[in-house]
Image (cartoon, rainbow, N blue to C red):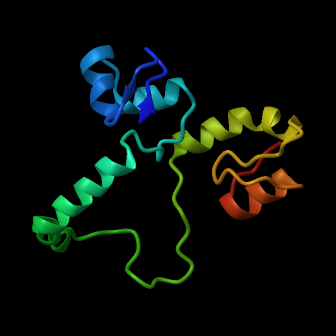
Amino acid sequence: MLVCIECGKEFKHLGSHLWHCHHILARDYKAKYQLDLNHPLITKEIREKQRKHAKKNETWKENFKKSVRYRFTKGTKGAKKYYSDETKNRLKKQSKDLLNKPSKLCPVCNIKFNNLAVHLREKHQLKYI
């Protein structure tokens, strides 16, 4: 269950709750509470249910074949994870606090590092002052 920070209630599908009860888009909610834009707002149970449904209903394959452009093909070497400009800007704003904290926990991959500045630069291509 996921807890809504606005009201403190638990939900399996937080995104729909945010819109119907608080009239907030998921993107605005994530920005307001400094969550990563890739952070899921549904439980693993719901994700699994959606995955099974998508597997049964294979129209997504046709839609994928129709798409002309996509970032990488399967097996492409050197493919890096894409971070949106919003995520990079949010992380840059938090950088001074992050680098001064003793825990040195990476906000992107949630792993503890001795030299966080080097990790952020090398792994995530984020440059900090």
Q: Is residue 76 left or right of residue 101?
A: left
60 is higher (above) or lower (below) than 34? below
Quadrant in the rendering for residue 62 = bottom left
127 is higher (above) or lower (below) than 30? below
Quadrant in the rendering for residue 42 = top left
Q: Is residue 10 left or right of residue 49?
A: right
72 is higher (above) or lower (below) than 8? below
64 is higher (above) or lower (below) than 35? below
Residue 41 x %, y %: 39, 39
Q: Residue at x 21, y 62 (%)?
A: 52
Residue 113 x %, y %: 82, 55
Residue placed most toward the observer, 45 or 66: 45
Residue 26 x %, y %: 37, 31
Q: Is residue 82 left or right of residue 107?
A: left
Residue placed most toward the observer, 6 or 10: 10
Figure quadrant of the C terminus: top right
Q: For the image shown, how many numbered marks are present on the structure?
A: 0
Q: Residue at x 78, y 45 (%)?
A: 128
Residue 98 x %, y %: 79, 38
Q: Residue at x 33, y 24 (%)?
A: 18
Figure quadrant of the N terminus: top left
Quadrant in the rendering for residue 118 = bottom right
Q: Residue at x 38, y 44 (%)?
A: 43
